[in-house]
């Protein structure tokens, strides 16, 4: 009888321990899965951010390069216009001819300025700088019972 009682006690204890162990194992596997999902989510957000930053840098470079080219073209056109106006003023013999040459030169410079400004406005501006993603909180490890 004593042996039967000991056997029943041992079986009862082993049943309790094995059910607790399987519950803890299930909790651990759920935690590991949630940690892996958390890592994947954060990695995807960081990869997306890096791609956005690279795209932003390229857009910004394209914009500044195009704007620089527009300004360089304006400088050369303005210098040519000024030289042409100066030559026309020097070639003019009367005060009215000189005044007309200067007015023509000013009108040409004004049209160059307007063309430059409209070209700069027509450029595609870079999009807003990407915002760094915020890290989500790591899943909480289940407490051991």
Image: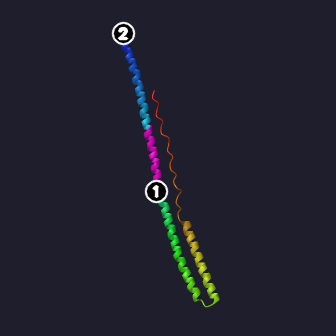
Q: Residue at x 62, y 86 (%)?
A: 98
Residue at image x 63%, y 90%?
A: 94
Could you give the CA–CA distance between mark 1 and mark 2, rounded to whole angstroms?
78 Å
Q: Quadrant of residue 13?
A: top left
Q: Which residue is mark 1?
A: 54
* Residue at image location 60% in from the left, 79% down from the top: 106
Q: How many discs mark residues in the rendered view?
A: 2
Q: Quadrant of residue 89?
A: bottom right
Q: Residue furthest top?
A: 1
Picture residue at 35% right of the left edge, 11% below the top: 3
Residue that protrudes farthest toward the right in the picture: 96
> x, y (%) of residue 80?
53, 80
| Dot label at residue 87 | none
- Residue 37, image x, y percentages: 44, 41
What is the residue that sits farthest to the bottom in this orientation? 93
Left/right placement of residue 4 relative to residue 102 reads left
Q: Dividing the image into 4 quarters, which one contains the C terminus?
A: top left
The range drawn in magenta is 34-52
Q: Main secondary structure of the magenta part?
A: helix
Image coords of residue 28 (percent x, y): 42, 33
Image quarter of residue 83: bottom right
Find numbered disc 2 in the image and state the secondary structure of the residue it sits on: helix
Location of residue 20 with respect to 65 vertically, above or below: above
| Magenta span contains residue 12 | no
Q: Quadrant of the N terminus?
A: top left
Q: Which residue, given by chain and number where applicable, does mark 2 sit on?
A: 2
Q: Is residue 47 magenta?
A: yes
Residue 14 in the image, given as x and y percentages of width and height: 38, 20
Pointer 1 or 2: first along the chain: 2
Q: In terms of secondary structure, where does tag 1 sit? A: helix
């Amino acid at each position: 009888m004593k042996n039967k009682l000991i056997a029943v006690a041992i079986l009862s204890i082993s049943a309790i321990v094995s059910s607790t162990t399987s519950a803890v194992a299930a909790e651990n596997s759920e935690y590991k899965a949630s940690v892996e999902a958390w890592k994947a989510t954060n990695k995807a957000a960081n990869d997306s951010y890096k791609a956005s930053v690279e795209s932003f840098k390229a857009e910004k470079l394209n914009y500044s390069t195009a704007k620089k080219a527009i300004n360089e073209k304006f400088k050369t056109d303005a210098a040519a216009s000024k030289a042409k106006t100066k030559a026309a003023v020097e070639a003019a013999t009367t005060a009215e001819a000189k005044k007309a040459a200067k007015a023509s030169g000013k009108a040409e410079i004004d049209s160059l300025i307007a063309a430059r400004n409209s070209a700069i406005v027509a450029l595609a501006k870079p999009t807003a700088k990407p915002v760094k993603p915020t890290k989500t909180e790591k899943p909480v490890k289940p407490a051991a019972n």
